[in-house]
Image (tube, rainbow, N blue to C red):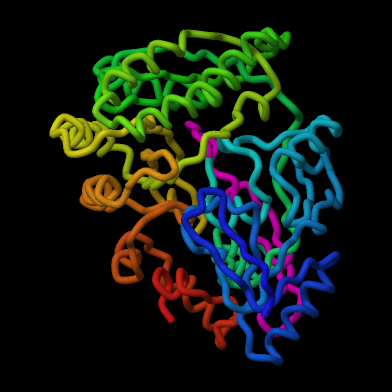
Amino acid sequence: MTSTLWRNWADTHRMTPARVVTPNSTAEVAAAVREAAASGSRVRMVGSGHSFTDIATTDGTLLAPTALSSVRGVDLAGRQATVEAGMRLCDFNEALARHGAALTNMGDIAVQTMAGATQTGTHGTGRASAGLAAQIRGLELVLADGSVCTCSAEEEPDLFQAARVGLGAFGVVTALTMAVEPAFLLHAREVPMPLGEVLERLEELRTDNEHFEFFWFPHTELTITKRNNRSPGPARPLPRFRAWLDDEFLSNSVFEVVNRAARRLPGLIPAINQVSARALTAREYVDASYRTFASPRRVRFVEMEYAIPVEHLADVLHEMRAVFASGRHRISFPVEVRFAPADDVWLSTAYGRESAYLAVHVYQGCPYQEYFADMEAIFTSVAGRPHWGKMHTRDLSYLEKVYPRLHDALEVRERVDPQRRFTNAYLERVLGV
């Protein structure tokens, strides 16, 4: 046994694996999997720890892909790039930019590893551009017997469909070929807006903009809306001081202090949220896409997020507003609302349906179970699908009702990992034993 204690970013899960391996190549990953199989040990690959669930934990062999962090090639003419599993999304963005390339869409946090982000279904917001996994064109995997396999829509298509958002259950992802396009600019408009106006204009806002999202401050009727649309330029990034003031000082340093105070004095949270919402004023800028999509997130929290059919969003928000009005909870973190088109990735939260995402957060160290339970009851009442890497209580009996291709994915799993070399407690809950 090792004495290595691993914990995730939010400190919701910890583990002490029997063995930690830091492979330098796909061949070394394959060797580690074969050694684990010979000893009857389970295997999991960890990323940056940004999942809130226990999806990465293991009592067996833990693979840490910090050395698998190279870009193998960028083919801008062919609109694709191949990257190793352990490279962080932010580093991949910078590497693509040096080649004049960019991802079409991404989330608002960019410190995850490429494999970790895609395997858990990380997404941004978009009218027509889907999550990261939908941008995968090919995967390199180490299977349970230690063999190396490549898959795509043409080669091993069922494995490809199952493994794009694969939860690490179908093999260890060692490299990904991603769709890319020429680098582009985004025109960002961030505007405070009353929640009532957002609800009235919801269809317009989400369909008239390439990327629309909003943050609603609980116990208030206040939101901050963000619209990102492509721009021919020129680039007009925020002045350095304004960027530091908004994104570092107010959104991180001050927000940290505010949440510490709210944790000690929860009765002040409604008033605090009124002040917080008004502190973030309107702003507008044009910058590189990856710098516009992502923002620094240094205040630690616990999160649950569900994807629901977009047509239910307004009703769900009204139900959430009633919960906040009841006084049962005092929540200092804003609710984040984003959108995605339907995609064809079997285990994607947006599979086969246009989706709205609702993310609820609690400052690290604050109780969250009852709040999340109340929100989860609302989300599941409209067949919501939980984000695989964020807190939820769903199991296979529920998930098989909301994922039409789940049983197809389980058949692939039976074929490629019949001994459940890659399982853990989380996978046993959501995919079965």
Q: Quadrant of the C terminus?
A: bottom left
Residue 51 magenta: no
Q: What residue appears at the point 25 percent right and 33 percent down from the top-left corner? A: 317
Residue 243, above or below 1: above
Image-based side of 327 in relation to 172, left or right: left
Comparing 111 with 146, the one in front is 111
**Residue 167 in view of the camera:** no
Place of residue 427 in the rendered image (x, y in percent of width and height, measured from the top left): 47, 71
Q: What residue appears at the point 68 percent right and 91 percent down from the top-left corner? A: 39
Q: What residue appears at the point 42 percent right and 30 percent down from the top-left corner? A: 259
Place of residue 155 in the rendered image (x, y in percent of width and height, measured from the top left): 69, 67
Residue 406, above or below 369: below
Place of residue 424 in the rendered image (x, y in percent of width and height, measured from the top left): 51, 74
Image-based side of 93 in relation to 317, left or right: right
Q: Quadrant of residue 86?
A: bottom right
Place of residue 361 in the rendered image (x, y in percent of width and height, measured from the top left): 39, 40
**Residue 210 in view of the camera:** yes
Q: Quadrant of residue 61?
A: bottom right
Q: Quadrant of the N terminus?
A: bottom right
Q: Bounds of the magenta span?
A: 124-152
Q: Residue furthest front?
A: 264
Residue 238, above or below 382: above
Comparing 375 with 190, the one in front is 375
Comparing 267 with 118, the one in front is 267
